[in-house]
Image: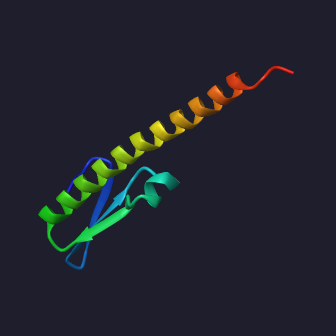
Amino acid sequence: MLIRGWDVREDDGLFIAVRRAPLSEYQKRYGALAQVDSREDGELYLLVDAQSRLADLLATAESVAVFARRRRQECALSESPAP
């Protein structure tokens, strides 16, 4: 079974998919998994698809959070009174 971005193997009737790219701490904290498994190949495909979508959405949320944090810092610096 080939799934883009994942290594899949079968071990004693259990399909195991391991993500190739590492997850950020943010993605891990909010539920993205580096590995999923299932006894059914169709179920595994759906689990991998769901995890891939979740990781993508979390990466976007992380980027938004970083951007907003930087923007707040820049605004705070520009509002500081000059010495």
Q: Nearer the viewer, residue 59 or 14?
A: 59
Instruction: Name the spot of residue 20 as percent of width and height, x first.
Output: 40, 52
Coloring scheme used: rainbow
Residue at the far right: name it.
83
Q: Residue furthest top?
A: 82
Q: Is residue 70 visible to the viewer in this orientation of the structure?
A: yes
User: Residue 57, position in %: x, y?
Assistant: 34, 45
Closest to the observer, 78 or 81: 81
Q: Quadrant of the N terminus?
A: bottom left
Give the side of residue 21 with respect to residue 25, left or right: left
Residue drawn at the location 64% of the way across and 27% of the way down = 74
Left or right of 39 in this view: 63? right
| Quadrant, the C terminus | top right
Residue at 19 percent of width and 77 percent of height: 13
Residue 80: quadrant of the picture: top right
In front here: 28 or 38? 28
Residue 4 place in picture, x, y as percent? 27, 47
Q: Residue at x 24, y 79 (%)?
A: 12
The answer to whether residue 22 is left or right of residue 80 is: left
Q: Measured from the top left, where is residue 81 in percent x and y? A: 78, 23
Q: Could you tell me if residue 23 is visible in this image?
A: no
